[in-house]
């Protein structure tokens, strides 16, 4: 790897290599047939536009480049069921293998056992991956603005919509936010972690949230390690939060989600958002 490559560049290089292998093994037409056999994708937006509470997007996450090992998660389906029992609005499943220890098999297992929307969280650079997501039952996909040029972002967003899915479009700064909105993003994720450096700033959401149109859904990503953090994001205008490490490490994941959901529905938090 070149010493000038960012962490994101390194991840994308691995993703592209693995993608080539999967494309050689599974033709696109086979994916399309699998996608056609899935039930229609659910629309997650009403769950995020529920003014009565902050939506919790609970993540199945084994490890990350910044934190290293997080949790074994031998049975992602059981963890997802616990999240759903706790009141999660949706489940995020990391499917990138090299840095995050995830797989499409994890996505399929989770899809089989939960009724709420499921997000394929990966570093998507090709429409083939969008078809994969639908073929394995995803209702949503993550599109990371920093990983895509504008033409690719627009094209992948259009492909997502054409398959009935919803894109969570992730940004980290004002330039990326403008690109996301220009591409037509309705569900905007603001990541406190800069994927190029892995540095975290919890001020990112508070800086960008006022710039996001009111008709777009705002999701705060990273930085939630207790219910209080959810309340802080709610105060800054979040409609939802994506929570990974905190929930994956919890001894009782259902209860951990339940506490976040309770905070998000508390009258004092609801009043902050009016």
Image: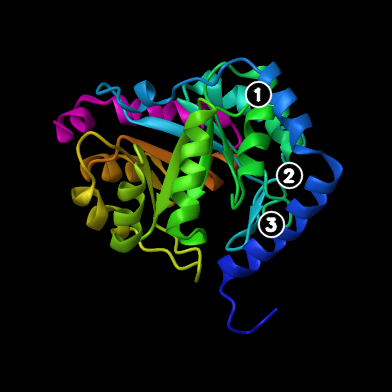
Q: Position of residue 259 (x, y in %)?
A: 42, 29
On the image, numbered disc 3 is attached to which residue? 15
Q: Nearer the viewer, residue 188 or 246?
A: 188
* Label 2: how many Cα within 10 Å (few below 14, some 14–19, many 20+): few
Sequence-wise first label, 2 or 1:
2
Residue 72: give its label. Answer: 2
Q: Which quadrant of the structure image shows residue 39?
A: top right
On the image, numbered disc 1 is attached to which residue? 111
Quadrant the N terminus occupies: bottom right
- As for residue 96 lying within the magenta part, the answer is no
Q: Which quadrant of the structure image shows residue 271?
A: top left
Q: How has the structure been colored for display?
A: rainbow
**Where 27 falls versus 136 (above or below)?**
below
**Where 21 falls versus 259 (above or below)?**
below
Q: Position of residue 108 (x, y in %)?
A: 71, 28
Q: Position of residue 272 (x, y in %)?
A: 16, 35
**Marks 2, 3: nearer the viewer:** 3
For residue 224, say whether it is visible.
no
Q: Secondary structure at mark 2?
A: loop
């Amino acid at each position: 790897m070149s010493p000038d490559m960012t962490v994101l560049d390194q991840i994308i290089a691995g993703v592209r290599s693995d993608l080539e292998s999967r494309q050689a093994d599974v033709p696109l037409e086979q994916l399309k047939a699998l996608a056609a056999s899935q039930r229609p994708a659910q629309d997650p937006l009403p769950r995020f536009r529920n003014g009565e509470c902050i939506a919790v997007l609970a993540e199945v996450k084994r490890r990350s480049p910044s934190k290293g090992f997080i949790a074994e998660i031998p049975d992602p389906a059981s963890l997802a069921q616990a999240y759903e029992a706790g009141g999660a609005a949706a489940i995020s499943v990391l499917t990138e293998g090299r840095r995050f220890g995830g797989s499409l098999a994890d996505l399929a297992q989770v899809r089989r056992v939960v009724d709420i929307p499921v997000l394929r969280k990966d570093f998507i650079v090709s429409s083939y991956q969008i078809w994969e997501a639908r073929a394995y039952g995803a209702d949503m996909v993550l599109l990371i603005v920093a990983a895509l040029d504008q033409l690719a972002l627009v094209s992948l967003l259009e492909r997502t919509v054409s398959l009935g899915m919803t894109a969570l479009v992730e940004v980290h700064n004002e330039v990326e936010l403008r690109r996301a909105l220009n591409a037509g993003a309705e569900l905007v994720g603001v990541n406190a972690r800069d994927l190029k450096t892995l540095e975290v700033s919890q001020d990112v959401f508070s800086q960008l949230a006022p710039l996001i149109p009111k008709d777009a859904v705002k999701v705060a990503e990273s930085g939630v390690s207790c219910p209080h953090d959810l309340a802080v994001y709610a105060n800054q205008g979040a409609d939802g939060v994506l929570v990974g490490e905190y929930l994956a490490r919890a001894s009782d994941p259902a209860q951990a989600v339940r506490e976040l959901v309770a905070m998000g529905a508390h009258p004092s938090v609801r009043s902050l958002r009016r």
